[in-house]
Amino acid sequence: MAYILGIETSCDETAAAVVRSGEQVVSNVVASQIAIHWPYSGVVPELASREHLRALVPVVRRALEEGGQTYESVDAVAVTQGPGLAGALLVGVSYAKALAFALDKPLIAVNHLEGHVHAVLLEEKQKGNRELGFPVLALLVSGGHTHLYMAERRERGWTYENVGQTRDDAAGEAFDKVAKVLALGYPGGPIIDKLARHGNPEAVKFPPAYIKGRPRPGRSRRRAGADTPGFTFDFSYSGIKTAVLRYTETHSMQQVIEQRRLALAEMKSAKADEVLKLCDHQTLDLVASFQRAMVADLVGKTLNAARELDVATLFVTGGVAANSELRAAFERDAAMAGLPVYFPSRPLSTDNAAMIAAAAYPKFLAGKFAGLELSAEASLPLK
Ligand code: KG4
Ligand code: ZN
């Protein structure tokens, strides 16, 4: 049995957690920075780093206390090395290095994206589900990423092959930018998720993103058949964001949006039901139609990749995996395709440190420890 302290500071959540042997969440503390970034409708990197500096020590202390642990009792310290905001990552990495050194405990570097995959594995193990079918295809859909990975469990841990990704904006970024264009508050995803229930998703038609095929090297291509023409599993979301902006211009929505922007500027943060009161039917229809188009694209392209790559299991993870319509559509369409699909619970879909501690466990078993020369890597790839 091993207790791993996980630390996560890659973006706008300061998080620490204790996880037992990669399968039991002992404590999970997340300090959100929403109120700090709210006035800017997006994450301001300098403010994020400063807030991590302020919040990290108390957050770690709380995670240990709530888990009935002490600095001395944990078996290892795991930290997100990247990808993410360089300054934000640096706070977590420097702190974890100092802590591991002072306590003389192993230090484990974790890729944030691997953390999102392990959020699913952790909870499935916690529920007693140890029989996953392989190969696994993981859709990682967050504010910074929309990536498809083939994930494999090997003797010395997990390996990942990237088989598709966004060519421009990430899906969560599109949710956040559309919320900014329409003045709905920040972060956009959870607000749009709630507002969309009040609009007509058929009201506005968005053309599907056409992506010119490019041949893909590697194992996944062989699996799908090397002669598959124009073969691609990529995504693109900058077009739909521009389409929403154009729609507001051609439908004279600017005045309504500006009024809402002024009303929200008065508040420090607002819940979706408060934003709802500031929305007319046209806005709600646009929001519902945007979400419908995003969901259709994510689900359609992922299931297409799953079919072509002949996978046995699907994971959907990352902040956008918290979206209700996305979950329902995946559950419905994957069931029709006879494909088991797994999501993390909502609290573990968005950024947290339990997923970092869980992803560290196979590395702990394999003795894959980081040295004190470890540095944060803003563009760390997942392999
Ligand atoms: O994984 P995450 O917490 O941070 C990154 O690694 O990026 O994801 C944050 C993203 C944000 O873009 C946020 O708007 C989106 O996830 N998000 C959602 C929902 N909850 C969070 N998007 C759609 N529906 C949601 N319910
Ligand atoms: Zn994330």
Image: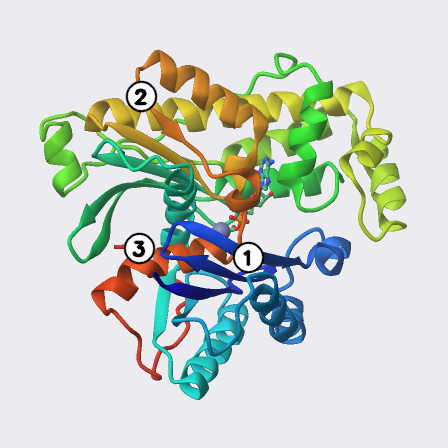
- Tag 3, which secondary structure? loop
Classify residue 287 as left or right of residue 121: right
Q: Earlier in the sequence, mark 1 or mark 3?
A: 1
Q: Nearer the viewer, residue 289 or 79?
A: 79
Q: Is residue 378 visible?
A: no
Q: Residue at x 24, y 52 (%)?
A: 158
Classify residue 266 as left or right of residue 383: right
- Mark 3 → mark 2, Cα distance in angstroms: 25 Å
Q: Residue at x 37, y 46 (%)?
A: 117
Q: How is the image coloured?
A: rainbow
Quadrant of image for the C terminus: bottom left
Residue 84 position (above or below residue 297): below
Q: Which label lies toward us, 1 or 3?
A: 1
Q: Is residue 36 visible?
A: yes
Q: What residue type is disc 3 on?
A: Leu
Residue 322 position (above or below residue 2): above
The residue at which mark 2 appears reads as: 339
Classify residue 115 as left or right of residue 352: left
Image x and y of residue 237, in percent: 49, 36
The residue at which mark 1 appears reads as: 27
- Mark 1 → mark 3, Cα distance in angstroms: 26 Å
Q: What residue type is disc 1 on?
A: Ser
Q: Residue at x 53, y 68 (%)?
A: 69
- Mark 1 → mark 2, Cα distance in angstroms: 32 Å
Tell me the quarter of the picture where residue 44 sits: bottom right
- Tag 1, which secondary structure? strand
Q: Residues within 10 Å of mark 2 (few under 14, many from 20)?
A: some
Image x and y of residue 326, in percent: 51, 27
Q: Residue at x 51, y 34 (%)?
A: 239
Q: Earlier in the sequence, mark 1 or mark 2?
A: 1
The residue at which mark 3 appears reads as: 382
